[in-house]
Structures are given as structure tokens and as C-alpha cells.
């Protein structure tokens, strides 16, 4: 192990915040170094519980997290918070603003919060989230709260790595409830109607309830009404989360989450490998345009059947 | 014709992470949003913790978010104490490698003192955004070079 890897692994073991922070960055840029750091720390089978929150922009996910997290800490958990914002597809930059509503909850040494940009993760959950979860778990955090950007594929991914999925809605989103039915509504475990002090919250709850009556298993799902301004319903929500967590089949969850992680990581690594191959053989690939179709060229590339500026004949 | 694969994700291309902080009360945050948008449009990841972080919070966030640069904007006279505190805390927490950039209403006579503390930029109102962005990029590049060696 290199010195950097050893120092960071040592830091993670101690729960040193700077090491955790640097490790999450390393995971984003240097997967090989990251895999070496994690090797000696990862405790197989000890998957942290993951509470995933999703829902339309502005419905109050961050504010809810800031109220829920201190209660999870009171229960004895070390809580990691990972909040995701979209990167601009044009500049690659991102405005990471979820801390605005959370700062109060984050001053505890039992809480570690990290803002993550999607960085062009194609339509799904960025592998960075998984890496952040692995890092936090390795540093002794046993409960991870993830705030997602709320889009189709990312939501499905969130569900795969979460032991409890919260769909947060707020009054006045009648149409959005309709639009969401197809995707996330099916995988949410708890429906939260936030801003419940506002008019229309009963109607929103009614819409969710009538939707749930049409799907199988719908009657087992919970609906919580919360108001972050009056803090009403927060204790009840925390209780519902606890109830759901206690019903989760630990082994099943661990296997599902692990499968999803392996799939994301494998895709990420192979995509990096392909990028490197293409960069390394740009000229040779260009020359193949004269002799074959693109499928044949891609197959050769993946077989490692290209070298330098020339393509090699397959050995028989 | 064949196009190169687009972005290869070398560490040189990892977006710069900048913490944008506006401590102390002065009632405006429009300016800070203009800056946040400019940084984002320049390809940076901007962590904005809202108004009024204390120096302690600024340093905590800078460490947890592993930022390259802390950009602090101040519009009242408290800059000396706040910058001094931030620099001290960074050193005490072994995070002295993070670049600190200042801006706001800073009297000319305070500038050299800030520079000596390691706070650079110290731009006044009306500075072209391009100038600030270039400076952030330069400082971030320095930080990354140092970290790579460390
Ligand atoms: N009236 C009312 N406002 C709330 C409540 N909860 C949150 N808000 C406000 O709603 C706005 C958005 O809250 P956030 O917590 O940032 O919402 P979010 O879902 O995290 O938003 P994004 O991260 O942008 O998707 C803020 O102005 C909050 O103060 C609530 O229960 N009642
Ligand atoms: Mg949010």
C-alpha cells in the first residue's frame, strides 16, 4: 500500500473527518487508489442502513433531514448524510445548496455530511454516492441518509441501495403526484406530505391514499404528514422509519444493495477502461473506418485487438 | 470521421470545489448568488451553506467537503477578525493547504495584512467576475499540486 493509502485508511479507522473527506474525493477521481484504501477496512456483510429521500424540488427534503438526523443521533446512530445535486451538462459545474437548510443539524461529531454533484452520471445514481456510503460505513457510520435529485433512473437506483425509501411531496403538487405514479411511487416505503400546515395537504394525502389502494401491497405503506415549520409529525415520521427498518430483511437488503453497488462499480470501471482504450488508440480506430463497420471495430477494441497506430490480425 | 471519446476523466479535469461563505450580517445575499452562478458556469462545484456561517463552521465545512478554495465575501468591517480566525482554525486542524480568497469592502490599508495572512484576491465591489474566476482557478491549481506531492 502507498503511503497515501495507508494514511487515509488509518484516518478512516480513527474516524478522522479530513481522511473521510479526502477519501470520498479520491473515490471520485482515482478508483484504484480508493479500492486499495477500502480493501483492509471494508467489513463484508456490515451494510449500513440507508434512508433514501426523494421528491420534487423544494418539497422540503433537506429541511426534513435536518430535523430527522438529530433524532437518529439520539437513538445512538452515527449518521452520514449524502446530498446530491445535478451537475450542469454544459459547464460541468454545480450549485451544491443542500447545506443551506441543514447546517444546524450538522454540528454534531456523530454526523458527517457531504454534498455530491452528479458529474454526468448517465441517467442514474452517480457511483460517487456509493463510494461515499462505502467510505462512511468504513469509518463507522451505521446509518446513511441520502437526498437524491429526484429523476427517473436515479430514483430506481436510490431504491436499490436504500433500506427505507421516503417519497416527499408537498401540497399543491396534484399533477406531480400523477406524473410520479409510474416510477418512484411504486418503490417508496413511506409517503411524506410535508408542509402539512399549508392548505391542500389533506387533498395530497388523499391522492396518495387512493393511489395506494390501487396497487398490490399499497395498504402496507405508510403516509406521514409533517410540517417543518411547526415541527409537527417529525417524531411520528422517525417512528415510521424505525418501524420500517425493523421490518427490513437484513440479509435480503444487504444482497440487493451489494448487487446494485457491484453493478454500478463494474459499469463505471468498464466505462473508464473503454475511455482509456479509445483515447489511446484514437488514430488506429480512425483508420479502421476504411476497412470495417463500427460494430466490428468496437468488438476489436474490446478484445484488445488494436495496437499502436495499426490494427492487428486476430491470432488463430 | 471518428471523434475522440470526449472527456477522459483525468484528475486535472475534476471540477474545482469551492466553498462560498458570507459570514456576518449585512442583509444582502444577491451578490453572493451572482458569484455562485458565475463559479458554477465556470465549471466549479460551489458549496453554499447559506448566510452567516461562523469561522468554525466555515472550517468544518471546508474540511468535510474537501474543498480546494474557500471564498469569503464580507461587506462590513469585521474582515480582519474573521479572516484571522479562519486562517488560525485551518492551521490548527491541519487544513492549512486550503486556499482562502477574500472579497468585499476591504480598505486598501488592510490588504497587505490580509495578504500576509495568506488571504489573496481581496477584490472590491465591481471586480469583473472573470478576474475572480481566474484567480480561483490559479489558487486551486496550486492547492492540487501541493496535495499531489503530499
Ligand atoms: N411552509 C413550509 N415550508 C417548508 C417546510 N419545509 C421546508 N420548507 C421550505 O421549503 C423550501 C425548500 O426546502 P428544502 O428543504 O430546501 O427543499 P428540498 O426538497 O431539499 O429542495 P431541493 O434540494 O432544491 O430539491 C425552503 O424555503 C424551506 O424553508 C414546511 O414544512 N412548511
Ligand atoms: Mg435539498
Image (cartoon, coloured by chain):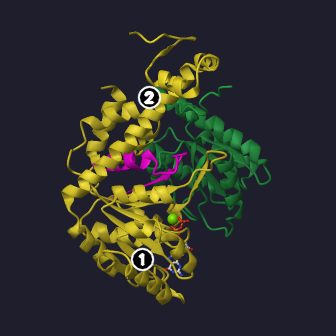
Residue drawn at the location 62% of the way across and 37% of the way down: B139
Query: Which of these two is toward me, A42 or A53?
Result: A53
Q: Quadrant of the N terminus of chain A?
A: top left
Residue drawn at the location 48% of the way across and 82% of the way down: A229
Whether residue A16 is visible: no
Magenta part of the protein: which range? Answer: A111-137
Q: Does the magenta segment cover residue A113? A: yes
* Residue at numbered disc 1: A192
Indicate the position of residue A314 as horizontal and vertical percent values.
44, 12
Residue drawn at the location 26% of the way across and 63% of the way down: A77
Indicate the position of residue B12 as horizontal and vertical percent values.
56, 31
Q: Secondary structure at mark 2?
A: loop
Query: Which of these two is toward me, A183 or A24?
Result: A183
Q: Secondary structure at mark 1?
A: strand
Chain A, chosen colour in render: yellow
Indicate the position of residue B117 as horizontal and vertical percent values.
59, 42
Residue drawn at the location 59% of the way across and 30% of the way down: B5
Chain B, chosen colour in render: green
* Residue at numbered disc 2: B150
Tell me if mark 1 has few (under 14), some (14-19) or many (20+) residues whose alpha carbon lies within 10 angstroms of its own. many
Is the CB of mark 2 within 8 Å of ligand 2?
no
Give the quadrant of residue A250.
bottom left
**Placement of B112 over or under A179, stated as above or below:** above
Tell me if mark 2 has few (under 14), some (14-19) or many (20+) residues whose alpha carbon lies within 10 angstroms of its own. few
Query: Which of these two is toward me, B140 or A86?
Result: A86
Left or right: A275, with A253 as reference point: right
Q: Are marks 2 and 1 in contact (CB under 8 Å)?
A: no
Q: How many marks?
A: 2
Left or right: B48, with A63 as reference point: right
Indicate the position of residue A205 as horizontal and vertical percent values.
44, 84
Amino acid at each position: 500500500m502507498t503511503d497515501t493509502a495507508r494514511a487515509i485508511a488509518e484516518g478512516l479507522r480513527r474516524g478522522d473527518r479530513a481522511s473521510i473527506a479526502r477519501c470520498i474525493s479520491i473515490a471520485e477521481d482515482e478508483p484504484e487508489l480508493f479500492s486499495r484504501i477500502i480493501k483492509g477496512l471494508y467489513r463484508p456483510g456490515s451494510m449500513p442502513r440507508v434512508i433514501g429521500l426523494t421528491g420534487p424540488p423544494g418539497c422540503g427534503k433537506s429541511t426534513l433531514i435536518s430535523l430527522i438526523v438529530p433524532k437518529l443521533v439520539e437513538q445512538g446512530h452515527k449518521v452520514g448524510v449524502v446530498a446530491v445535486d445535478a451537475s450542469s451538462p454544459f459547464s460541468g459545474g454545480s450549485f451544491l445548496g443542500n447545506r443551506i437548510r441543514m447546517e444546524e443539524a450538522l454540528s454534531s461529531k456523530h454526523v458527517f455530511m457531504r454534498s455530491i454533484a452528479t458529474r454526468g452520471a448517465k441517467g442514474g445514481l452517480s457511483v460517487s454516492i456509493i463510494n461515499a456510503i462505502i467510505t462512511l460505513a468504513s469509518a463507522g457510520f451505521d446509518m446513511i441518509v441520502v437526498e437524491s435529485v429526484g429523476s427517473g433512473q436515479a430514483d430506481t437506483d436510490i431504491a436499490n441501495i436504500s433500506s427505507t425509501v421516503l417519497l416527499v411531496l408537498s401540497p399543491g403538487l396534484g399533477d406531480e403526484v400523477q406524473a410520479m405514479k409510474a416510477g418512484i411511487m411504486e418503490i417508496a416505503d413511506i409517503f411524506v406530505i410535508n408542509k402539512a400546515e399549508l392548505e391542500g395537504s389533506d387533498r395530497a394525502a388523499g391522492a396518495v391514499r387512493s393511489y395506494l389502494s390501487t396497487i398490490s401491497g399499497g395498504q402496507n405503506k405508510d403516509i406521514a404528514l409533517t410540517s417543518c415549520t411547526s415541527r409537527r409529525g417529525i417524531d411520528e415520521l422517525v417512528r415510521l422509519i424505525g418501524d420500517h427498518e425493523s421490518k427490513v430483511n437484513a440479509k435480503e437488503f444487504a444482497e440487493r444493495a451489494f448487487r446494485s453497488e457491484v453493478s454500478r462499480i463494474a459499469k463505471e470501471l468498464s466505462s473508464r477502461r473503454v475511455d482509456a482504450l479509445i483515447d489511446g488508440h484514437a488514430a488506429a480506430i480512425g483508420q479502421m473506418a476504411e476497412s470495417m463497420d463500427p460494430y466490428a471495430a468496437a468488438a476489436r477494441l474490446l478484445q484488445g485487438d488494436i495496437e499502436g497506430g495499426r490494427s492487428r490480425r486476430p491470432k488463430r | 470521421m471518428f471523434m475522440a471519446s470526449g472527456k477522459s476523466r483525468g484528475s486535472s479535469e475534476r471540477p474545482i470545489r469551492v466553498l462560498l461563505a458570507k459570514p456576518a450580517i449585512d442583509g444582502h445575499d444577491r451578490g453572493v448568488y451572482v458569484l455562485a452562478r458565475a463559479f458554477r458556469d465556470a465549471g466549479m462545484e460551489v458549496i453554499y451553506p447559506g448566510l452567516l456561517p461562523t469561522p468554525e463552521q466555515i472550517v468544518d465545512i471546508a474540511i468535510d467537503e474537501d474543498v480546494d478554495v474557500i471564498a469569503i465575501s464580507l461587506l462590513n468591517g469585521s474582515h480582519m477578525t474573521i479572516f484571522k480566525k479562519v486562517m488560525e482554525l485551518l492551521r490548527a486542524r491541519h487544513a492549512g493547504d486550503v486556499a482562502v480568497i477574500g472579497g468585499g469592502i476591504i480598505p486598501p490599508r488592510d490588504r497587505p495584512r490580509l495578504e500576509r495572512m495568506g488571504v489573496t484576491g481581496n477584490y472590491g465591489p465591481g471586480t469583473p467576475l472573470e478576474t475572480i474566476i481566474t484567480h480561483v482557478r490559479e489558487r486551486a491549481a496550486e492547492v492540487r499540486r501541493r496535495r499531489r506531492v503530499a
